[in-house]
Amino acid sequence: MFRLTAQLPGINIISDSAECLYIYKEGALWEMNKTDLTQRRLIGDVQDCHPVFTSGNNRILNCNGSLTVLQPDGTLQIIGGRLFPDVQLGEDLLITDRSQRPNQLIRLNAAGKEVWRKDIALGNQHLIVGDKLYYLRKDSYNVRFNIINRLSLATGEHDELIDFDPGYLDKVPDKERYKNAFYYLLMANEEVIVALVNNNRIVAVDIHTGAVKWEITVVTDAKGHAAVFPFAGPVWGGMFDGKRYVLQGRAFSYIDPISQSAVVLQYPLLDNTGRELNVFASRKEGEQLLYTASVGGKDLNCIGVFDVHQEAVIWQEEVPIAPRATLRDAPLAGSRYLFVADSNNVLYIYEQG
């Protein structure tokens, strides 16, 4: 299905778009076309670089500590220091201003004008439903793991949707380690936002009122028998046909908000040769999940393609990483290629065919 076509040392993947891979090499930021693999040097003398976003034909990124606009002709415009793009909203961006105390969140339009500015710092989780952003909040250096927050994308007005501590602090699995309830966002629709809470239950919250609508503490297998609870955050996988499918660890499962159920379809998880598989990370690509995994309890050195509808691995290969190296993340995809990097900053490119 895929074959190794290139092995490029000295490359660190920064981020990607539908068309391009953004990479750091030779002290510079480069753009690699995902279709023909051509490379273009964007910015030189780079000490540190954050994910690249787009606005119109411009590239927007934080490079060397400054928010930078890269125009199509190569012109660089420095907007300001300690401004970090977080979320793409069509042609607009949500940008965190870390020069302020407390940090501030800005909605910046394609013309570079502020739509609004609020005293908000986003954590590393968010979901968008309609004109609302549901997110994990940071207060200075304190991350509020127990609270789902709600933000109007139009106005920047924000509030707390739910604090899980009152109902779920006593259900934290390790009270010595966790001082608050905690959650991982899974999915949302026009009625509920669904989260994995305390790594031991699925909780659905009304997106209008913040009330708990339902929760799942017992999962079943495909035949309706009780099964091992397979979920732990952060949760990998993707949405298919209104269900949240999870390919992670030693299980393939789904969560269905309509039937308010969680079903383990495979446990233990097996690869296409019948060996036991432990998935480190997976991401949705079309009707499939791309993954990195270890096989038989060995090194994290395999990538593969899992077909959700067939409920099976349809391709898998061991990546020729060096001893003691490990793969970093799930593969990224282009129209013909898969891209995956290892901890030694080697980029492996696999071609379909």
Image (cartoon, rainbow, N blue to C red):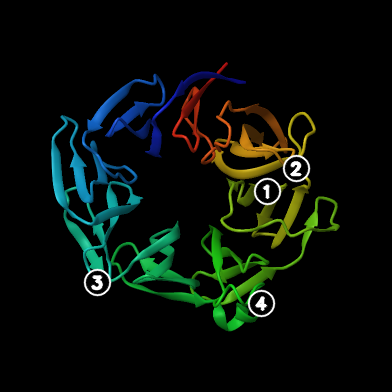
Residue 104 position in % (x across, y down): 26, 66
> What's under tag 4, amino acid-wise?
Lys
Residue corresponding to mark 2? 269
Which of the two discs, 1 and 3, labels the residue nearer the N terminus? 3
User: Are there few (<14), some (14-19), or many (20+) residues within 10 Å of tag 1?
Assistant: many
Residue 89 screen position, x and y as percent = 33, 51
User: Which mark, by number, is residue 101?
Assistant: 3
Q: Is residue 273 left or right of residue 161?
A: right
Foreground residue among 255 and 177: 177
Instruction: Give the CA distance from mark 1 to mark 3.
Output: 39 Å
| Amino acid found under the numbered disc labelled 2 | Leu
224 or 276: nearer the eye?
Answer: 276
Residue plotted at (67% across, 70% down): 215
Figure quadrant of residue 200: bottom right
Residue indicated by mark 1: 249
Spatial separation of the CA atoms under disc 1 and disc 4 = 23 Å
Write the residue at 27% across / 72% down.
102
Numbered label tally: 4
Q: Is residue 162 above or below residue 189?
A: below
